[in-house]
Amino acid sequence: MTKGFNSFVVLFFFPLILLGQSKSADCGSVRKGIFYLYPQKSQTKFAIMRSDSTQEEVNLITTDTSYWKVSWQNDCMFNLKFIRKSHPISDGEKNFYNSHTTVFKILSVTKDYYTFKAGLDSIATTNPLTDTLWRKAR
């Protein structure tokens, strides 16, 4: 074999081997559970408890809790629709929540966290949120 052929084999087949070993997002493992969110540039912390059809979000600083209906669109996409908050909210805030749906796309899943993209009514919005939900509190 020539040196050029060996280089071809390494350059051509090595990326294919790596692609074969990469694992697609196991979104089923995050359909239910307790997760933690630490929004960037904020001191706020959230605990998120999700069942297959509901989600409870607790602000760990203020203890304010919001409740959401979860609708799975496919294995890695779901929508959240507002149900209620634990403290009174204004009519304007209630109207805003009730007239919109938050759409989530799970991007990757590891044993410690998962990453997602989210948008108001669509993930194709101009400025979707991309962040991480952790499986353990930090």
Image (cartoon, helix red, strand yellow):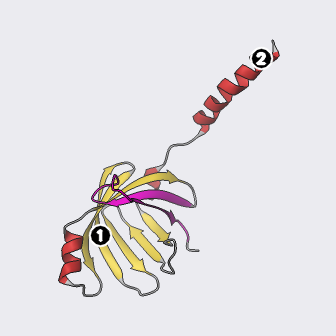
> Which one is closest to the eye, mark 2 or mark 1?
2
Q: Can you give x and y, in whole percent of width and height, for residue 49 in the image? A: 41, 70
- Residue wearing tag 2: 4
Kindly give the residue lying farthest to the top in the view shown.
1
* Mark 2 Cα shell of 10 Å, populated few (<14), some (14-19), many (≥20): few
Q: Tell me: residue 61, above or below residue 36.
A: below
**Image point 46% across, 82% down: which residue?**
60
Q: Which region of the structure is painted magenta?
A: 113-136
Quadrant of the image containing the N terminus: top right
| Rendered location of residue 51, percent (x, y) | 36, 64
Residue type beneath disc 1:
Trp
For residue 53, side relative to residue 32 (left or right): left
Q: Amino acid at mark 2?
A: Gly
Where residue 127 sits, quadrant-wise, is: bottom left
Which circle marks residue 68 in the picture? 1
Say whether residue 108 is left or right of residue 56: right
Q: Closer to the N terminus: mark 2 or mark 1?
A: 2
Q: Is 6 displayed left or right of 32 in the figure?
A: right
Q: Residue at x 27, y 59 (%)?
A: 121
Question: Residue 39's spot in the image, x, y percent?
Answer: 48, 72
Please give the label number shown on residue 133. Answer: none
Spatial separation of the CA atoms under disc 2 and disc 1:
59 Å
The residue lying toward the viewer, choosing from 71 and 105, is 105
Q: Secondary structure at mark 1?
A: strand
Mark 1, Cα crowd under 10 Å, few <14 / some 14-19 / many 20+, is many
